Amino acid sequence: MINIKNKLTPYQWLMAGLSIVSIFLIILDFAAVISIDQPSSKWFWVNSVIVVFFAIDYFHQLYEAKNKKQFFKTHIYDLLSIIPIVLFQLAFCLWDSMFLIYLV
């Protein structure tokens, strides 16, 4: 028998679908098939809308949480998912530059 309580809600399906699309876009960007870093690309805007949607969802859930500290600790991956990949690239470039300056 199938337990009806274990079925996914439409919200969960939406979030799973958006997560898959976002991961797919990042993989295609790393493979240089598309560009999600250039505002002139339609994929940049698709990815941006997904990230904004995740951000709104995260901060809404944080606002609604009774124990915000516990929510923050247990949803750290959700927080990381709303940080655009460009910030990771920028941080890596800054780290690399600081390392080069240290060597000189």
Image (cartoon, rainbow, N blue to C red):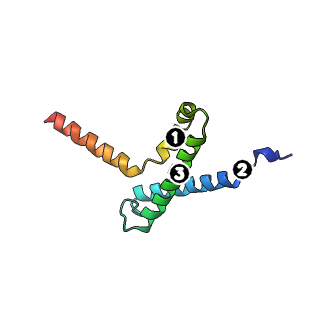
Q: Amino acid at mark 2?
A: Leu
In the displayed structure, would residue 96 be above or below residue 34?
Answer: above
Residue identified by numbered label 2: 8
Name the residue rendered at 44%, 64% in the picture. 45
Residues packed near mark 2 inside 10 Å, few (<14), some (14 to 19) or many (20 plus): few
The quarter of the rendered structure image containing the C terminus is: top left
Whether the residues at callouts 1 and 2 have beta carbons within 8 Å, the answer is no
Does dot 2 land on a helix, a strand or a loop?
Answer: loop
Of the residues under marks 3 and 2, which one precedes in the sequence?
2
Q: Which mark is in front, 3 or 2? A: 3
Pinpoint residue 101: horizontal percent, then vertical percent. 17, 38
Residue in the foreground of this view, choosing between 35 and 84 = 84
Of the residues under marks 3 and 1, which one precedes in the sequence?
3
Is residue 88 shown left or right of residue 58?
left
Q: CA distance from mark 3 to mark 2?
A: 21 Å
Whether the residues at callouts 3 and 1 have beta carbons within 8 Å, the answer is no
Residue identified by numbered label 3: 56
Residue identified by numbered label 1: 77
Looking at the image, the residue that sits furthest to the left is 104
Q: CA distance from mark 3 to mark 1?
A: 15 Å
Q: Amino acid at mark 3?
A: Ile
Q: Amino acid at mark 1?
A: Tyr
Pinpoint residue 25: horizontal percent, then vertical percent. 48, 58
Give the quadrant of residue 94.
Answer: top left
Name the residue rendered at 40%, 67% in the picture. 41
